[in-house]
Amino acid sequence: MINKNEWLIVGLITSCHGINGQVKVKSLSDFDERFLKPGIRWLQKENEPPSKIELISGFKQPGKETFIIKIQGINTRNLAEQLKKFKILVKSDNLPNLKKEEFHLLELIDLKVKILENNELKIIGKVINLENEKNNLLVIELFKNQKKVLIPFVKEIVPSVDIKNNFLIINPPSGLLELYI
């Protein structure tokens, strides 16, 4: 299901922290250990190829979705400043194991989108991307007009995901499918 050569963006370096080379990271992951547990990660500047780094340590800022991390070889504020806007990546084949009925957001890409209409499931589009700014949003391309719609990924609106059969069902509030991006 997941292309083993793809990368998963798990965080974004937003700024430096202090004078010893630590950086502040905005988490785009549900797995805090990505910023707490030492080990290999990857950094990417814009669309350049990712480069391997080693996470030395990290801690979560109390009450926030941000982490302060220390990267090997980055030991001054000037070096840390150069990493601003870099993405932190992991390889998509290095995803944590999930429980039954759980899945990784990356697995949602290319799923067909169905809606219940007149007691019949009808395919209306497919998931083409994900947006993750505090809320997980599915970017769905509608087949009828190729318009892109943002759908909040919450149980009330996306009650069913069937990875094995390559589709999900949405129950959008009235007017949501008319809001294009």
Image: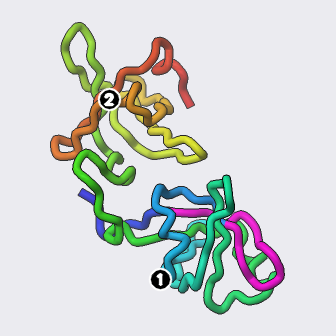
Say whether residue 115 is left or right of residue 43. left
Which residue is at 78% across, 85% downward? 20
Query: For the residue carrying disc 2, how many other residues have a C-alpha within 10 Å: few (<14), some (14-19), or many (20+)?
Result: few
- Residue segment shown in magenta: 10-24
Q: Secondary structure at mark 2?
A: loop
Residue 112 counted in the magenta span: no
Which residue is at 40% across, 26% downward? 157
**Residue projecting furthest to the front:** 62
- For label 1, the residue is 40
Residue 95 position (above or below residue 132): below
- For label 2, the residue is 159
Query: For the residue carrying disc 1, how many other residues have a C-alpha within 10 Å: few (<14), some (14-19), or many (20+)?
Result: some
Which residue is at 70% across, 68% downward? 24
Residue 55's x, y, as percent? 56, 82
Q: CA distance from mark 1 to mark 2?
A: 36 Å
Q: Quadrant of the N terminus?
A: bottom left
> In this figure, which colouring scheme has been used for the structure?
rainbow
Q: Is residue 78 visible?
A: yes
Residue 20 counted in the magenta span: yes
Which of 154/166 is in front? 154
Which of 126/53 is in front? 53
Which residue is at 17% across, 46% downward? 164
